[in-house]
Structures are given as C-alpha cells and as structure tokens.
Amino acid sequence: MDFQKHIDYYEQMEHDPKDPMPWHALFLDLSIPFDQKAKGAFLYDSDRKTRQYLLPFMRVLARLSIVLIQILKIFTPRFLSSSKALHYCLYWGMKYWITPEANFLILRHFVMGSEVLQFIKDNVKGAEDQPMNPLKPFELNEVKNDLFLEHDLNLYNFIIRLNKGLRERGEEVERIERPDFSALTEGDFPFENFRNGWTNFLDLNTAIEIFTPVYQFFLTDGDFWRASHSLQFDEVIGIYVAKILGNPERLVHLNNKHPMVPESTLRTGHRLLLHGLSTEILHAYLVESKRKQRALVGEKVGM
C-alpha cells in the first residue's frame, strides 16, 4: 500500500477558516519531529468513524474486562496462559480486522525501537559487547514469533545490562561529539503489502483497547504487569538519547509518566498509544540529527 497518498490527502486539503480541520492542522504542524508518511497514516487512521463512535464503548468494556481478568488471575494465576496462543490471536486480529495504516504503524514501532536501542548502545563507551536481540518484522507472520513479548523483554534486558556495565566501569551515559547514527534507517522500511479487505476497519486506537485485555488474558499477572510497566520507560530512553546528543529540550514530548511510580493497568491501552508516538518522535528526531550531522560534515569538507 502506498502511504504517500495520506501525505497528498492532507497537503491538498482545502483550508476553511470558518471550519478548520483538526487533523489538517496537526499534519501541517512542524513542532514535533515525525516521519511524514507515518504521521499521515496515523492522522488518517485517527479520523475513522470507529475511533469516533466505537472507541468510547470499547474503552469502557476493555477496562471492565481488565478488572474481571485481574480477579480471575488472583485465583487461577496461570489459567490459559500461553504466549503462543496470544500471538496467534494478535496476528489473526491484525491481519483480518485492523486497518493497513494501523499495521504499518505497529510494525514500524518494533523496527524503530530496535534501531533506537542500537543507537544508544553504539554511543555508550564500553557497551560494544552488550548482547542485543533486534526485532525487525517486515511481515505480519513474524508476529507469531512472540514478537510483542520479546519487545518488552528487550527493553528490560537492555536497561539492566547497560546500567550494570556503567556501574561496573564507574561511568555514565555522556555526550558524544560526533554520534554514530549508522543504526538509523532513513526512508521507508520494506514492509509487505497489508491486507485491505472489508473487515479491516478497526483503527489503531480502538484495536489497542480491544487487544489489551486479550494480552492480559493469555499472560500471567506478572507478565502483564511487567509489559504494562515497560511503557513508563519512554522517558528513560529519552534521557539516554538527550545525554548522548546534549539537546534535551527537543525531547519534551517523550512523556509516559515516571517509571518509579507505576500506573494502573486500566490505562494500558491509552499509554500504549503514547508509547508508540514517543518512539515515532524519538526515531524521527534521531534521523533528523543524522541528516544535520551529515550536512555539517559535508560543509566542512567543502570548505
């Protein structure tokens, strides 16, 4: 699917001063770094009727389901717990029920997350030998390989290993004069063409609310809590990048609450959406910084 059409849609949209379109204003706004195709896809997907009319009801039902499943897990903590069953359900739901735009944004998230972690590793002295498990799914079939669970584990393991190494060496994450941006991909990722049948109508926000209690149902209570709490590490990753680049003011939008004050799992769906946006912003900022550094080096070479 060509996601360029969403850019064209908003760029060619007529501006009516008496009835301005909120999504139009958000697309044209340049205050937040964001890949233009991803931004267009996200805003176009957010403008669907399911988000306007179905999401409010699904959010209430999803949060009620989270409470009921939490009670169930107290008495039967491992009842039907199965990562394989979970990821098959997620794959099935993604392939047949959610929009191509939503699938595009979800797979982008895993790829960008891996690239951001690799960037930090590449720019922390002494972290060269830290093991990594990069996730770069370009097809929905790869969801079946415990993709969501591995994503959460990668984040925790990365933070633990990075900081154990820093503590052992008596060092900190520090500013790098010329950061190594080689981990960052510029341009499009080679995703498959996502299914776009008549059943693919669920927008990203609504789909996340529906999938959250499913995620909880097929995991142990501890696994679900760990996955939910991982969303609050957006600011931690943002701080690492801010220290490396020495430019923290540009990362003000990476805000998913303080990691030492756990949020209720009831708001996991909404916070998961914020997590996805934080990753988009951070990756776009790094790509922007990569281009600026290359241009600066080119200017110095030409002098």
Image: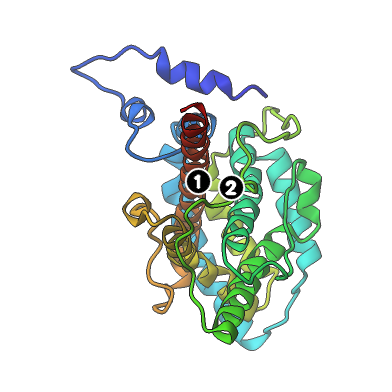
Seen in the picture, residue 2 relative to 114 is either above or below; the reply is: above
Q: Nearer the viewer, residue 74 or 119?
A: 119
Q: Which amino acid, by three-letter code, is at mark 2? A: Phe
Q: Residue at x 67, y 78 (%)?
A: 220
First-in-chain label (1 vs 2): 2
* Viewer-nearest of discs 1 and 2: 2
167 relative to 270 in the view: left or right: right
Q: Residue at x 54, y 29 (%)?
A: 37
Q: Nearer the viewer, residue 92 or 289?
A: 289
Report the disc number at residue 286: 1
Q: Quadrant of the N terminus?
A: top right
Residue 171 appears at what percent x and percent y? Answer: 51, 78
Q: Which amino acid, by three-letter code, is at mark 1? A: Leu
Report the disc number at residue 92: none
Residue 229 appears at what percent x and percent y? Answer: 51, 72
Q: Residue at x 46, y 52 (%)?
A: 278
Residue 103 appears at what percent x and percent y? Answer: 64, 40
Q: How many neighbours does mark 1 have within 10 angstroms: few (below 14), some (14-19), or many (20 or more)?
A: many
Give the image quarter of residue 19.
Answer: top left
Q: Secondary structure at mark 1?
A: helix
Q: Nearer the viewer, residue 1 or 177?
A: 177
Q: How many neighbours does mark 2 have within 10 angstroms: few (below 14), some (14-19), or many (20 or more)?
A: many
29 relative to 147 in the view: left or right: left
**Color theme of the render:** rainbow
Q: Which residue is mark 2?
A: 181
Seen in the picture, residue 51 relative to 157 is either above or below; the reply is: above
Seen in the picture, residue 28 relative to 94 is either above or below; the reply is: above
